Amino acid sequence: MFDSKNQSTAVLRRWTINNRNTDIPKIITDGNLYNVYNSSRFVEDGSYLRLKAVTLSYDFNMQKIKAIKKLSVYATAQNLLTITKYSGFDPEVNAFGRSATELGIDYGTYPQSISMIFGANIEF
């Protein structure tokens, strides 16, 4: 709530003079950074089911066309679908790369991108 990191919309419910009945702490503006420490308040279930990679391919019967011996087309997708109740962008990422001591810390890290590749194999 005090820096340029991505924030969830939950910070809109933060403590203010007009909003005292909340579970989100107030923004500290006097240099006191005690409300930025990690705590169990931010722990949530990160369970997820992901379709990580899928490839579909089709081989055409080319017996009637003598110039082409073989033709196949394919499509490959990565990170196509994620099912989760996790409130962050992506339950599989963390802010510190592959650090074994800081796994699971999110800080609003950008999610893994969805990528798709389409292609054809033609044999003459």
Image (cartoon, rainbow, N blue to C red):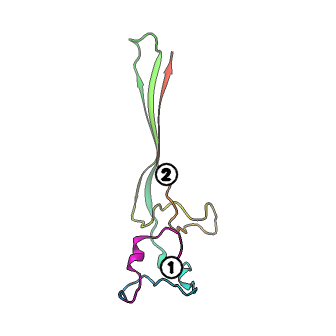
Q: Quadrant of residue 37?
A: bottom right
- Residue 40 disc label: 1
Which residue in the structure is indicated by mark 2? 113
Q: Residues within 10 Å of mark 2 (few under 14, many from 20)?
A: few
Dot 1 surroundings within 10 Å: few (below 14), some, or many (20 or more)? few
Question: Circle 1 sits in a helix, a strand or a loop, which is it?
Answer: helix
Is tag 1's residue or tag 2's residue first in the polypeptide sequence? 1
> Element under label 2?
loop
Check disc 2 and give the amino acid type: Ser
Magenta segment: 1-17
Q: In this orientation, which residue lies closer to the viewer: 50 or 106?
A: 106
Q: Amino acid at mark 1?
A: Ser
Q: Indicate whether residue 3 is drawn in magenta.
A: yes
Residue at left offset 62%, top offset 60%? 98
Q: Residue furthest front?
A: 30
Whole-percent x, y for residue 75 in the image: 44, 36
Give the label, 1 or 2, closer to the camera: 2
The question of residue 6 being in magenta is answered with yes
